[in-house]
Amino acid sequence: MIAIFGLLFLAAIVAMVVGEVMSRNSQQHFQGVKVRRFGRIATVVFAVLWLLSMSLRVVPAGHRGVVFSRISGVQEHALPEGLNFVFPFVSHVENINVRTNKLSDDLEAVTSDLQQMKFSVVVNYRPIASEVHKLYKEIGTSYVDIVLIPALNEITKMNTSKYNADEILERRQEVKDVITRDLAERMKDHYIAIDEVALSNIRFSAEFEQAIEEKQVAEQQSKKKEYELEMARQDAEIAQTRARGEAKALKIKMLAEAEANQALDKSLTERILQYRVQMAYIERISDKIEIMVVPNESIPLLNMQDFINKK
C-alpha cells in the first residue's frame, strides 16, 4: 500500500511539473494553470493519504501489538486486535502471538534410584496478553529459546529425580502436576502462562524394562494366589456355616425325638402298671372263673372298685 501511495504521489509531482512547463507557453497558459492546480491538489491529497497509511497498523486476531517508539522506547501498553493508530515514522509495531502454543521436546533424566530414563514432554504455553510489552522489553521475541526451554529442562529433571522408576510409571499424573506447577510459577515472572505439561513415551534401559515386566508377572501371579486363597477361605466359611446349621437342625431333631420318647415311656409305664393291677386281679379271681376273654390289641379295662371291695 505504501508503494502505491508513493507512485501516486510521484504522478502528482509529474503533473505539477508538466503544468509549469505548459504555463510558459501563452497558448497553453490556461491549460497549464489547470494542470498545475490539479497537480498541487493531488499532491496534498496523496500526501495526507500517505501519512494516514503510515499511521495505521492492523493487529491480527490472537495477537497483541507492542509499540516501540524511537523517541521513548517500548510503550507501556499493547495494541489490541484490529485497526490502531500510531505516530508515523517514529513508531514500530511488533505483533506478538498470545494464543496457546505447543512446545515439544525429548529429554533425558535420572531417577532417584539412578535409572536412566528418556521421555517426551509437551508444554502448552501462552504469553500473558496484558503483559506482552514487558515480555518484549525484557526478553524479546525469542523468549521460548531464552527462558522457556531452559526452565523446562531444569524443572523436569529436578522433579523426576525425586521419584524412583516405579513411582514415575505408577504416579505419572502426580509427577506431571508437580512439573506443571513449578514451571508455571517460574514462568509467571517472565510473563508467560503455562496451561499444561504432559509426559509421554517414557522409556528405560532394556534390562530395567525386562525386570519391570517380570515384576508385573509376579504381582499378577501373587494376586491370583491371593484370590484363590480368599475363595478357599470363603468356601470354608460357607462349609462351616452349613455344618453349624446342620448340627443345629440335628440337635433340634434329637431333642424332639427325646421328648417324644419321654412321652412314650411315660405312656408305657402307666399302661404297664395298669396291666399288672389287672393281672393281680385275674390271679385273685382265677379259681372262680374258667375262661376269661382279653382283647388282642389292647389291655382290657376292669372295674377295680369291685376288686377292692371284694378284697
Image (cartoon, helix red, strand yellow):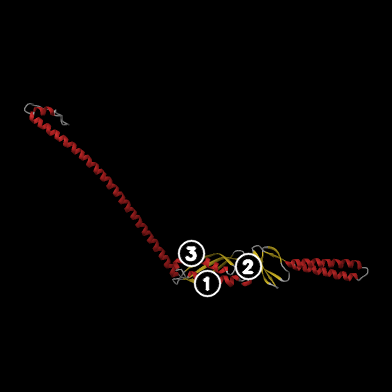
Q: Quadrant of residue 186?
A: bottom right
Three-letter code, disc 3: Glu
Decide if residue 19 is on the left or right side of residue 99.
right
In the rendered structure, find residue 174 and report the number of the disc placed on it.
3
Q: Residue furthest left?
A: 287
Residue 4 visible (yes or no):
no
Residue bearing mark 1: 154
Compared to residue 279, the image places residue 119 above or below, namely below
- The Cα–Cα distance between marks 2 and 3, rounded to whole angstroms, is 31 Å
Q: Nearer the viewer, mark 2 or mark 1?
A: 2
Q: Position of residue 223 (x, y in %)?
A: 38, 60
* Secondary structure type for disc 3: helix
Q: Quadrant of the N terminus?
A: bottom right
Marked residue nearer the N-terminal end (1 or 3): 1
Residue 43 placement (x, y as % from top left): 82, 68
* Any part of residue 143 in sight: yes
Element at label 1: helix
Q: Residue furthest right?
A: 26
Q: Say what secondary structure mark 2 lies in.
A: helix
Locate residue 185 relative to residue 26 in the image: left or right. Answer: left
Q: Going from the N terminus, do you reach mark 2 or mark 3 first? A: 2
Q: Is residue 85 above or below residue 244?
A: below
Badge 2 or badge 1: first in the primary sequence: 2
Q: Quadrant of the C terminus?
A: top left
In the picture of the structure, the residue carrying the numbered disc 2 is: 132
Q: Nearer the viewer, mark 2 or mark 3?
A: 2
- Which residue type does callout 1 highlight? Glu
Residue closest to the eye, 158 or 28: 158
Residue type of the residue flagged with mark 2: Val
